[in-house]
Image (cartoon, rainbow, N blue to C red):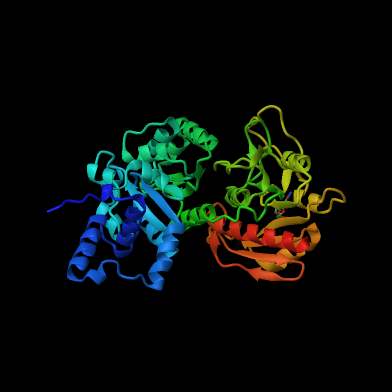
Amino acid sequence: MASLTVRQLDDKLKKQLRLRAARNGRSVEDEVRTILRGAAADEDAFVPPRTEAQRGRASEADAAHILLIIGGGIAAYKSLDLIRRLRERGIAVRVVMTAAAQKFITPLSVGAITGEHPFLDLFDAHSEFDVGHIRLAREPSLIVVAPATADLMAKLAHGLADDLASAVLLATDKTILLAPAMNPNMWSNRATQRNIALLAAEHVALVGPNQGEMAESGEAGVGRMAEPLEIVAAVQARLAPDSRALAGVRMLVTSGPTHEPIDPVRYIANRSSGKQGHAIAEAAVLAGAAVTLISGPVTIPDPHGATVIKVESARDMLAAVEAALPADVAVFAAAVADWRTTTNSREKIKKSGKQAPELVLVENPDILSTVAHRKSKRPKLVIGFAAETENVVEHAKRKLARKACDWILANDVSPETGIMGGDSNTIHLVTANKVEHWPPQSKTEVASVLVSRIAAALGEQK
Ligand code: C5P
């Protein structure tokens, strides 16, 4: 009996076969067997006509297909939910698992959710001939690594390719989105941070890691993998960004806390993480804006593609903002310290054992209000935030008038909301003539909704 290998078929037919197999939850070989069985039983059944729904699904898969590389970390269990969430949104997912990932979740469970066997081994002749690591690297619209371990990132940063995952990452010409997950000490280790800096220079994008509790009991810090919905939002922003929505727009964003020095070692600070401001800067870059991000001290990575100016104090931030004007849009997401001390001692203040030193506070300049009240170089759209713990909307309305800005994004930051430093946000958009209540969303989603609203408002102004 004649033998046929899928490898010898032409590329178009192989692609159709793979799509059919993925739709039907079968391996390519099983799909071929099914077709041949059907053909033997009834010649007309050889190519059954596709239904409208199937055609729709195929074109979705053609439009958006990502390769998910699952690394070996406890967060790997979240990647199963990630696959489900992506598929719910019509995004086809093909999976590569590292050897370490298979210690945490099984290829069987991944295959059951994707409807296709995950790819496991660079030296597996079967899968290498069926698709091949070069095609795995080239065919998807985007490659997502979740969880991205310190080891995988180190390999990518240094060009190692000793397994399927690292070989694919080295061979791809597509955007790579990493969702790092590791112990906080591993994340803050200088070797990891050096690798992150190398990867950032190569335009590898990051989502997370977040601050929070680790799987190890009692451990907490920066290193938790971003939640599946946050990763989905980052994927969607990259798959279908309206890359012209803010083309030609100059956008200024402030983010993070400010540090107000008391002496060379002490300062006044607040709990802002910078996540919301950084997400807005990143969403604006993806929408084609020229973005200047002025950031206070944060532990999260710089967004890709923005000009980042790092400052410490409120007065430094104001100077940097004024130097960055003119801009078409300014978003003030920084949690600027309201006060600084009147004295900034050059020497470390010593305990005297008698009386504690008195700190005299003086109010900082209000950066948002200063820019919004400018006669010259006032951006067309000035947007502020209002972090409140009570009467959120009422306070925001008063703030809008007092600070002369165009929009306020108000949110409740009572400790029980977990917004300060957390990953999601519930926004009330207050403008001169209306209030909109947005549903709870990830900070990435808030950023992309805000960017679309900015694009629409600039369009109306024109
Ligand atoms: O007055 P409040 O701090 O609640 O106002 C919040 C808004 O004002 C935020 O948009 C924040 O970035 C901005 N702000 C500022 N400079 C300050 C204080 C707040 O730009 N000194």
Note whether 289 is above or below 392 in the view shown.
Answer: above
Residue 173 percent location from the top left of the image: 46, 41
Note whether 17 is above or below 50 in the view shown.
Answer: above
Note whether 115 is above or below 159 in the view shown.
Answer: below
Note whether 111 is above or below 358 in the view shown.
Answer: below
> Residue 164's image quarter?
top left
209 or 316, which lies in front?
209
Residue 71 percent location from the top left of the image: 35, 44
Regarding residue 333, the answer to whether it shows in the image is: yes
229 or 402, which lies in front?
229
Location of the C terminus by quadrant is: bottom right
Residue 148 percent location from the top left of the image: 41, 43
171 or 254, which lies in front?
171
> Residue 120's image quarter?
top left
- Numbered disc total: 0
- Residue at point 47%, 33% (across, down): 195
> Residue 45's image quarter?
bottom left
- Residue at point 56%, 56% (across, down): 443
- In the rendered image, the residue lying farthest to the top is 347
Left or right of 428 on screen, residue 8? left
Left or right of 144 on screen, residue 350? right
- In the rendered image, the residue lying farthest to the left is 1
Location of the N terminus by quadrant is: bottom left
Left or right of 206 on screen, residue 181? left
Regarding residue 85, the answer to whether it shows in the image is: no
Residue 220 percent location from the top left of the image: 44, 46
